[in-house]
Image: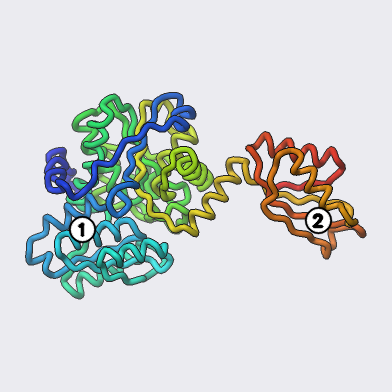
Amino acid sequence: MTGLVGLDDVRAARELLGDVVRLTPLEPSRPVAQQVGGPVHLKCENLQRAGSYKVRGAYVRIARLPAADRARGVVAASAGNHAQGVALAAGLLDTNATVFMPVGAALPKVAATRGYGATVRLVGATVDEALVAAREHAERTGAVFIHPFDHPDVIAGQGTVGLEILEQLPDVRTIVAGVGGGGLVSGVAVVVKALRPEVRVIGVQAGNAAAYPPSLAAGRPVRLPRFATIADGIAVGTPGDLTFAHVSKLVDQVVTVTEEDISRALLLLLERGKLLVEPAGSVGVAALLAGAIPDAAPAVAVLSGGNIDPMLLMRVIEHGLVVAGRYQKFTVRCADRPGQLATLLGQIAEYGANVVDVAHQRQDARLRLGEVEVMLKVETKGPQHADLLVGVLREAGYTVTTG
């Protein structure tokens, strides 16, 4: 199945979706624009029904099934967003859904999938392992397998995002979207290259889970031996045959970003944009901020989803603060005498930093007699402020170790 989806397929999918999906807003982002040097807009699919664009493709795929197939139910595999999209679409179309999710899937995503009416089964450590279990279930029960990306109806459904972008921002020059299996970027590219071939379509993968660069170099889908990233929504080890055909022919470039880039982007979107976006949904912004896409503006970055585990959000925020130089961890060696800690903390406060956590270490062979090591976590105003604080403490005679 390597025939490419066409523009008419995407337009037909849009008619089928009708009032099922929301026309998500395209919001300008001044902080990202300042970094890029030109206008940047954010396509807010994190505000879509079920929290991501996935409901578009899932609904089109299930709606086009013959009635007899829908009566047998559907089965899917996903880390969360496709799971919720399938569960919602199946409920709207009065079809039973069984969804296989990795054992480590975020609890809120599992709960939401069940909340939409699907039966959830936790199997395997990765989406790829859940996919195997879902296919076996389909063969055993006769349920129809709804692939998360590698099907023409799914790609056509996701392509409706591209139609909306071109209508909302006619002068767009670059569209940036995250890539896991490649369904979203394939659908967007189908639309863009048919209507506005001069507009660049750039895919973005997490560097720790980037199957497309080696696959494109080899000219065929290549399986990663291992992969792990905070962007679990795009943690896919092997491109699909159909999506690979689309990406290799229609997508201009696939770039990668680091975990630090993703954390920084997520924090900026939350703090400056007031947008709750999951790590996989922020990789497009991460690529723009990291300078991975020169001459991008006017650009649109697709915020593909907003389904994030609150516990992961806490960790990512802390990581993002560290990357941004606003959350520093360092140790200070000083004399172990009464009042010394108060003096140290007073000096830190004098320079406008806020101590978040403090701990003492006395029993360590590295320490001299009468010396104590104080471990500090401190909020600062940025890298320059942090460097100033460390410099002041060293000038005061303290031995300071950062990191």
Q: Please state the horizontal and vertical placement of residue 276, each as a whole percent of the image.
A: 42, 47
Q: Quadrant of residue 66?
A: bottom left
For residue 135, say whether it is visible.
no
Instruction: Identify the residue position indicated by label 2 in the image.
Output: 373
For residue 42, say whether it is visible.
yes
Q: Please state the horizontal and vertical placement of residue 397, each as a whole percent of the image.
A: 87, 43
Disc 2 marks which amino acid? Answer: Glu
Q: Is residue 129 above or below residue 324?
A: below
Q: Quadrant of residue 80?
A: bottom left
Mark closer to the chain start, 1 or 2: 1
Residue at 49%, 59% (x, y): give it: 311
The CA span between labels 1 and 2 is 57 Å
Q: Is residue 209 above or below residue 7?
A: below
- Count the marks: how many? 2
Q: Is residue 367 above or below residue 394?
A: below
The foreground one among 297 and 343 is: 343
Query: Residue pushed farthest left?
Result: 67
Residue at 39%, 69% (x, y): give it: 124
The crowd level at tag 2 (other Cα within 10 Å; few <14, some 14-19, many 20+) is many
Q: Secondary structure at mark 2?
A: strand
Q: Secondary structure at mark 1?
A: helix
**226 relative position to 246: left or right:** right
Instruction: Identify the residue position indicated by label 1 in the image.
Output: 89
The foreground one among 192 and 32 is: 32
The foreground one among 378 and 215 is: 378
Disc 1 marks which amino acid? Answer: Ala
The crowd level at tag 1 (other Cα within 10 Å; few <14, some 14-19, many 20+) is many
Q: Is residue 20 above or below residue 125?
A: above
Residue at 84%, 57% (x, y): give it: 372
Q: Which mark is residue 380?
A: none
Q: Please state the horizontal and vertical placement of residue 4, each as a whole percent of the image.
A: 18, 43
Q: Please state the horizontal and vertical placement of residue 44, each as a whole percent of the image.
A: 33, 42
